[in-house]
Amino acid sequence: MNSSSEMTATETAPSPSPGLVTTTVTETERNDTLREVSDEEEEEKIRRQKKLEEALEAKSLRRIISAYLNYPEASEEDLKKWERSYRKLSPPHKALAPHYPMKFQRLRRCISANSSFIFNMLQTFEPPIDLSQDHDGCEDSNLECAHEKYTLDERHDSSCQPDLTNSCTYKEEIKHMLEPGVPIEVSFSSHDWLDSSLQTHVPLVDVDKVRCIIRNIVRDWAAEGQRERDECYKPILEELDSLFPDRQKESTPPACLVPGAGLGRLALEISCLGFISQGNEFSYYMMICSSFILNYTQVPGEWTIYPWIHSNCNSLSDNDQLRPICIPDIHPASAAITEGFSMCGGDFVEVYNESSHAGMWDAVVTCFFIDTAHNIIEYIETISKILKDGGVWINFGPLLYHFADTYGYGNEMSIELSLEDVKRVASHYGFEIEKERTVETTYTTNPRSMMQNRYYAAFWTMRKKCAVAA
């Protein structure tokens, strides 16, 4: 009975108005279509943005590789300029410098040796991106602005800090590439990045950065750089050693991060102390070179370079200017590093602001680094975020803000705090100073030069006392 009643009710129930049903379906379809169009437009926007970023990355890396490859030609041009000046001397004046033609020959041999090192280094480098990709459709102005955005100033003496490239997009691939012990398989395809069609002539300022890298090699990987390492790295290593006296007894060694690791020597020395050590570096100039030294050098003193040949100024003698430097002074693979030593490529803030790093590090070591920031407050905030409560921040360096003098770029940000303000900001983010002093030092300075620029660097140990809300 109930069943019959229900059937009847179903059969006699009034149907919705046909016009109303039609209108509802049309509206739904229209909304679905609009959503689909909107999603497609958003996906296309994301795809175009990604393509632009990849093109910017490829352009920047091609430019850096071209700077390395242009080194011999640019050096030869300098040498020819010196020869032209010598030829302008009168015969009596030439007679007072009869050794100059022989010096020019020696300089060419030195340039050849440096070039050999560079080319062997580049042969081991496998770019993490396709450098032959087409970047048509990307605005040239965007490409140029990107290069400027990721460029650091030189330090105000004859040394420098290298270019930055937007490598954060590819940080995982770069991290894998730079890990000691991980082989780099070089694939020579039809679009090999050494192909001449992919090489370009670059401004001499780019080649100057290559010369800076050669001087940085002396600082990190030559016996002649030991004095600077003792002035800058030794206080840091001694402080870590005293702060973590029981690290060898722990089942898991303490973890130390080294932002701005450069060519990797400080990060390696920290690993040798018994820490899980990771170096972070944003410069492809640096990463290409550090990967070669860390992963491919076979014995101490394997390579001979001539880092001081590019300046005729302040030389005590020609032999000082043309003296050879053997690298590396140690074999990195035989340096008793702790398991877990690695180098990670990418922008410090972008890489380590990820939630996976929050409160994960026992120590952060910054050496000649914090003044490389557009916004030093952001650096300090990130350091606080990634340190464990009770973790330590050890800093060494000046406040020579790299973007302070970037004239002509109205949107270029540069926050230039005094040392007093830096310490006040650090206090806001939960840091308390335990030790502080000033250390006099140099940075990639030729020890036999008549000009020695020195820094009075701030050296401190701060401890993170409590978690601080963002």
Image: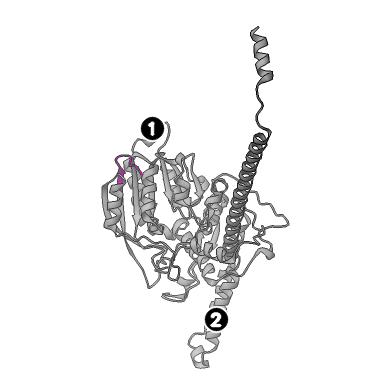
| Residue 164 x, y percent position in the rendering | 50, 59
Q: Which residues are magenta?
A: 461-470
| Residue 318 x, y percent position in the rendering | 47, 75
Number of numbered discs on residues: 2
Residue at position x 37%, y 55% from top?
376
Q: Is residue 468 magenta?
A: yes
Residue at position x 67%, y 26% from top?
15
352 up-or-down from 324: above or below: above
Say what secondary structure mark 2 lies in: helix
Q: Is residue 103 magenta?
A: no
Residue 306 is at least partly visible in this image: no
Label the magenta part by its dominant secondary structure.
loop
Q: Tell me where residue 369 sits by quadrant.
A: bottom left
Residue that numbered label 2 is attached to: 81
Q: How is the image coloured?
A: one colour
Residue 407 is at least partly visible in this image: yes
333 left or right, relative to 419: right
| Residue 419 x, y percent position in the rendering | 29, 58
Q: CA distance from mark 2 to mark 1?
A: 61 Å
Say what secondary structure mark 1 lies in: helix
For marks 2 and 1, the one nearer the N-term is: 2
Label 2 sits on what residue type? Lys
| Residue 446 x, y percent position in the rendering | 42, 67
For the C terminus, the image quarter is top left
Q: Please name whichever residue, 339 or 43, is drawn nearer the observer in this view of the structure.
A: 43
Q: Which mark is residue 249?
A: 1
